Amino acid sequence: MSAIRITQSVGLGGANSLDDVKTVQTALNKLLKLIPPTQALIVDGRLNPRPENSKTVAAIKLFQSKVLTMVRPEGKIAPNGRTHKKINEKLAGAAVVAVVPLSGNLKTKLKQNMMKYEGNVPHMYLDTKGYVTVGVGHLLKDVEAAKKVPFIIRDTGAIASIKQIEDEFKLIKSKPFGSQAAVFYKPFTKLVTTEAVREAQVEQHIRIFESELKRIYGVSEFASYPNDVKLALFDMIFNLGMPELKDEFPNFNKHMKVRDFKQAAIESNRKDVPTERNTYVRNLFKSAK
């Protein structure tokens, strides 16, 4: 959303048509960072029976006070009026921010943290849930996925054949898992990936996770998050996957929507994750400015 159009006035003394009110509510939700401590508005096209007590009107007044520096906020938005134009200006600015890619420094730190908590293993191994994995937590969901990875033979550097990849995948898949470290599986392997291949896999993960995080939290909203919050979210989605982060952490996501990162920190704890890693993520949320 880079601009809104309303046909009639919205707010105190306004016409308040259902669609116009919905449009304003949606826009204000995109600009919550400008009007703290406003919480996300319900986009229902309605105002309180007494508009002066409406949360939408309160948000309009706060926007007028904080952004337009009105001494006496009127609580109403007129089509193409001063408040309407300023909302569109801020929405356009948010849209520009949204397309800016992750900074080089942030991406470097993200990669370092991924390698710290996921490892950087050149050979196939089983993660704690029994999934065949390689590199920096790169899941090979089945033998077909494994065959797409350009493995080489460790001792010779020759390109591994499809048959060699299939056989090694099946061998590793048959081994025990749970408490075994990745190094446990090395004696059973002859194939490895190069550093360049593992680097490319990490880059791919970051692109995919960034896209998924923007789908969950909104493109401009995610782009506006402090870097510590982005790092924390990347760690969570890497470990959990998009469906679980989106659907299994309702309290966490409720706090994220209103940018209450301190409360989000409390709800960020994950099962089957080492205490050190949960603490790392929790502290990132707590330190966010």
Image (cartoon, grey):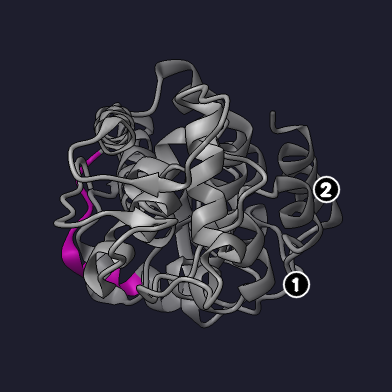
Q: Between 174 and 39, which is closer to the camera in this rendering?
A: 39
The chief SS type of the magenta part is: helix
Dot 1 crowding, Cα within 10 Å, few <14, some 14–19, many 20+: few
Residue 2: x %, y % from top left:
21, 40
Q: Is residue 223 magenta?
A: no
The kind of residue on which mark 2 rests is: Thr
- The image shows residue 28 at horizontal and vertical percentages of 42, 49
Q: Residue at x 23, y 70 (%)?
A: 19
Q: Amino acid at mark 1?
A: Lys
Between 175 and 247, the one lying in front of the other is 247
The quadrant of the picture occupied by the C terminus is top right
**Residue at 40% from the left image edge and 70% from the top image edge:** 43
Q: Is residue 86 above or below residue 281?
A: above
* 128 left or right, relative to 8: right
- Farthest-out residue, bottom: 174
46 w.r.t. 232: above or below: below
- Residue closest to the eye, 280 or 115: 280
C-alpha distance separating marks 1 and 2:
12 Å
The mark found on residue 201 in the picture is none
Helix, strand or loop under label 1: loop
Give the residue number, with chain letter if any, for mark 1.
271
**What are the residue bounds of the magenta stretch?**
158-167
Q: Which residue is mark 2?
A: 279
